[in-house]
Amino acid sequence: MRRGTLDDLAAFAAVARARSFTRAAAELGLSPSALSHALRGLEERLGVRLLARTTRSVAPTPAGERLLRSLDPALAEVARGLAGLADWRGEPSGTLRLTTFSAAARRVLDPALPGFLLDHPAVSVEVVVDDRLTDIVAAGFDAGIRFGEAVERDMVAVRVGPDQRMAVVGTPGYFARRPAPGSPADLEAHDCVNYRLAGGGLLPWDFARGGREIRLRPGGRLVVNDGALTAAAVRAGAGLGFMLEADAAEDLAAGRLVRVLDGWCPPFPGFHLYHPVRQATPALRALVDRLRWRG
């Protein structure tokens, strides 16, 4: 494409929409004569008459109408691209789209997002809570928050929380009826409250000790797909639960829950914010700085 042709095409679109050289020239910051000269040059290069001119009016020819229909979406896309550059300079601004799961939303975002939004009034945040591992690039997210072990290696990952542990817990009343399990294999003799993942499978109960790893999906009469309902059922004595240690800590300290198989639940990498390997916008950099784990 000849240098300047894109400018001439944008000028043609302005005249065709305004049906006036005078109004289009004012919009583009040109003189009417300079605009008319540019469009005559465009028509000569294309070998097609694009505008029908009279002493009183100007209107696109059928060829011009066809060209305008093609140009409008392309020029709108260019305008959106230029507007988007505002996200890369100056103060944090624009919209951030995040994907995460319920535990991370509760423990990482709940305490931090209100203050972040107050400090950055030009930033908007959309959070989608989903247990599934979402392809953030394909789904149009700026970043995600997951456990560190679930983050793909081609992503930039920033720790936003401490290491985590799982805990197998039940009420004192439950253990008054059933003996405590001594090993993960003993869970098969217990009622376990299982969690149904968004993809359809049950959340595995993963254990490790002395280099030995065990993955179970123990039996039980209750399966749910909501973390709060899982915790409520376990606290009510319906069965054993496999919960984040942090979520059970208050009940354990108060004696409402009892922990078993403690030695089989090693720590694992906690919550990480991750995003594609590319320059982050000021808004995303500000959010990363707010959430970064400094413990």
Image (cartoon, grey):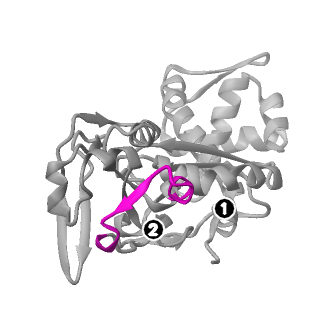
Disc 2 marks which residue? 164
The residue at the point 68 percent across, 40 percent down is 11
Q: Identify the magenta region.
A: 249-264
Spatial CA span between label 2 and label 1? 22 Å
**The C terminus appears in which quarter of the rendering?**
bottom right
Is 192 on the left or on the right of 138, as rendered? left
Residue type at mark 2: give it.
Gln
Assign a secondary structure to mark 2: loop
Is 209 on the left or on the right of 237, as rendered? left
| Quarter of the figure with residue 284 | bottom right
Residue type at mark 1: give it.
Leu
Residue 150 placement (x, y as % from top left): 35, 64
The residue closer to the viewer here, 64 or 269, is 269
Residue 217 placement (x, y as % from top left): 18, 51
The residue at the point 42 percent across, 53 percent down is 136
| Quarter of the figure with residue 285 | bottom right
- Membership of 114 in magenta stretch: no
Residue 140 placement (x, y as % from top left): 46, 48
Q: Which mark is residue 31?
A: none
Q: How crowded is mark 1: few (under 14 residues within 10 Å), some or many (20 or more)?
A: many
- From where the camera sits, is residue 160 visible? yes
Disc 1 marks which residue? 287
The answer to which of marks 2 and 1 sits earlier in the sequence is 2
Asked if residue 155 is positioned above or below residue 171 in the image, the reply reads below
**Mark 2 and mark 1 residues within 8 Å of each other at the beta carbon:** no
Asked if residue 57 is positioned above or below residue 171 in the image, the reply reads above
The residue closer to the viewer here, 244 or 58, is 244
Kindly give the residue lying farthest to the top in the view shown.
56
Question: Comparing marks 2 and 1, which lies closer to the viewer?
Answer: 2
- Membership of 263 in magenta stretch: yes
- Label tally: 2
The residue closer to the viewer here, 263 or 103, is 263
